Image: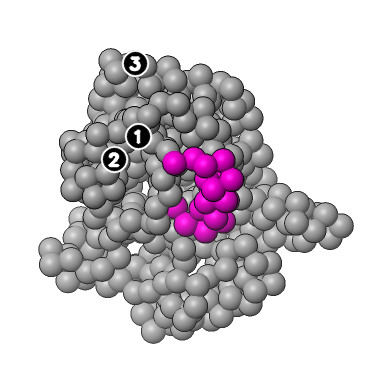
Amino acid sequence: MPKHLKILVNDHAGHPFPTQLSRALAARGHHVLHTYCGKLQGPRGELARLPQDPPGLRIQAIDLGKPFNKYGLFSRALQERNLGRMLRETARAFNPEVVISANTPLGVQAALLKECRKSGARFIFWLQDLLGVGIRNNVEKKIPLVGKPVGWLYIGLERCLLRKSDAVIAITEDFIPIVSNAGVAAEKIHVVHNWAPMGDIPCLPKSNSWSRKHRIHDKFCFVYTGTLGMKHNPGMLVELARAMATETDVRVVVVTEGLGAEFLQEQKERHRLDNLIILPFQPFGEMPSVLASADVLIALLEPDAGAFAVPSKVLTYLCGGRPLLLAVPAENLAARTVMEARAGIVVHPSDTEAFLVAARELFHSPDIRATMGENGRKYAESKFDVDRIATRFEGILAG
């Protein structure tokens, strides 16, 4: 029996699977504070205490009082500074023995690590995305003249944070060379693949309260749900809606908010795409019904994001028992996972024609869809055992 620890789990994004990890660790007797950014636009897990939650679990929003501006270069920097200060104060009051932090802006991550060094807590960098590379790519596009040095500044910061961490948990083996090149010793690098809270995502019938509410229970639905931002190409969804416009019983349903939703709304009006349905983020409790409304689930990732990001929505999709259509670089872990599970079709994100051909193939092939959906669910059942995952984390957290 491992020693019971006082653990701060910080997941800036508020995703479902880190929240499930916190619940699993608390159920094992650890005292867990789970923090997240309270005003971040994005899909969320179950971030309220549930009646069955263990007494050792506390969930707390780090609330800036206004929405977190993911895309404003200077306003975001100021918000990161305030968020880092608030997170440090929260950590100081909780006084954990170990901190694990994921999906966190690099400035905020630096503030939290600094607090750990001051208090003596171990700091574990849960590496979900290579944020430095992503920031460099985005900044270079926005401000070409100064974007490159600014981008390399963030890459340097991320490398420094990785090096100063007591351990690094990477979600894919693909990150190991980059973490090693940052100066992290091999014994401090661990790989734990992401997962989805399968028990919270039962397979439901297509005709359910959510699909009936939105009048899509009797339609063939291509469904995209989740963030649709800099790493994605919403134009693919527009082209899909245009290609399927003559199929009167087909709908392209997109559950998202922010820049991607605004772009889609403009394109919907411009091209008069009545078959394109745009909905805001849904509560996590509705996720099984959202997935069940789909006949095909879609994920997107731009070519230059394939090396630094892994779309976790794909793992949630696998739980839903529906076939997947991915426009994702083949070398990305999400693509490899879908191919290993034989749960869908993967095309290159730059090949719109291949994407549309695959969509039509799935549309016309009910037997293939059924087999791929079953394969995805079986894969999730075999891989997403939270007890096994919690045991792995306990070993890393104990040092």
Q: Quadrant of the C terminus?
A: bottom left
**Residue appearing at x 65%, y 74% in the figure:** 75
Q: Secondary structure at mark 1?
A: strand
Residue ID for mark 2: 216
Asked whether residue 46 is drawn in magenta, I would say no
Chain-order first, disc 1 or disc 2: 2
Left or right? Give the position of 88 relative to 36: right
Q: Mark 1 and 2 residues: CB-CB less than 8 Å, in contact? A: yes
- Residue occupied by mark 3: 365
**First in sequence: mark 1 or mark 3?**
1
Front residue of 321 and 310: 321
Query: Is 71 left, or right, of 85 in this rendering?
Result: right
Tell me if 295 is positioned left or right of 270 in this view: left
Q: CA distance from mark 1 to mark 3?
A: 14 Å
Q: Which residues are magenta?
A: 256-274
Residue drawn at x 42%, y 17% as measured from the top left: 361
Q: Residues within 10 Å of mark 2 (few under 14, many from 20)?
A: many
Q: Position of residue 385 (x, y in %)?
A: 25, 41
- How packed is label 3: few (under 14 Cα within 10 Å), some, or many (20 or more)? few
